[in-house]
Amino acid sequence: MKSDPVTLPSPSPQDGSPIAKPDFKDVFESEETPLLHFAFGLVGRRAVAEEIVQDAFLQLHRHWETVGNPRPWLYRCVRNRSLNHIRDHKRETLTDPSDTESQTEDPREAPDAVLGRLEATGQVRALVSELPERDRRLIELKYYDGLKYKEISTRTGLTVGNVGYRLHHLLKHLADGLRRLGVEYA
């Protein structure tokens, strides 16, 4: 049973009244799923995202009395832990491990640029994972398997024109999703 999200209070109420801090259970119930999506978007692996979010909640529990506003604290914690994971596991690749070309990094590339690229890749993966199965399959066949429209048509039963049309609109949908998330891309 999914409950409505809990609205956490803003850090400074306009009427000057004291802020009632939500209880830990309410914070967990309202923030766990969005934090999982956020972490998955950064690291691109569900198991790692789950571990990062679990660690963040454990840290929050340990520091509960000193944390004034848990929501931004959790997002900052998850972001930092995700970036640490990316840094510590940079040899792991977000693409096909047999693709050695994607594993070569330009040593002159700024660390911020590398992290930005990894974050964008994670966000694309998160957006693709939210697509309906049929659309996700088209993206996989074209961009992961590298098939031509005719080959995709043969595998899916769609016409070649319909494959092109659907992929065009799927890419537009993904680009809009990235724009909404504030991800800059070329």
Image: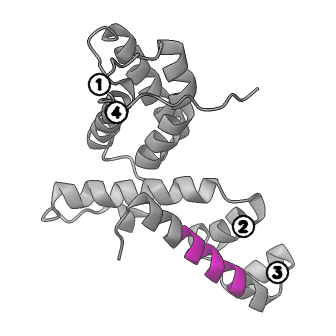
Would you say the residues marked 2 and 4 are in contact, meaning their CB atoms lie under 8 Å apart? no
Give the residue number, with chain letter if any, for mark 4. Answer: 72
Q: Secondary structure at mark 3?
A: helix
Give the residue number, with chain letter if any, for mark 2. Answer: 135
Coordinates of residue 114 in the picture (x, y in percent):
26, 58
- Of residues 148 and 28, the one nearer the viewer is 28
Please identify, in this view, whether the residue under mark 2 or under mark 1 is nearer the observer.
1
Distance of label 2 from label 1 (alpha carbons): 50 Å
Q: Which residues are magenta?
A: 164-174
The answer to whether 11 is drawn above or below residue 91 in the figure is: above
Distance of label 4 from label 3 (alpha carbons): 48 Å
**Which circle's residue, 2 or 4, is located before the other in the chain?**
4
Distance of label 3 from label 2 (alpha carbons): 16 Å
Give the residue number, with chain letter if any, for mark 1. Answer: 16
| Observer able to see residue 105 | yes
Please identify, in this view, whether the residue under mark 2 or under mark 4 is nearer the observer.
4
Please identify, in this view, whether the residue under mark 4 or under mark 3 is nearer the observer.
4
The answer to whether 174 is drawn above or below residue 111 in the figure is: below
Would you say the residues marked 4 and 3 are in contact, meaning their CB atoms lie under 8 Å apart? no
Point out which mark residue 154 bears: 3
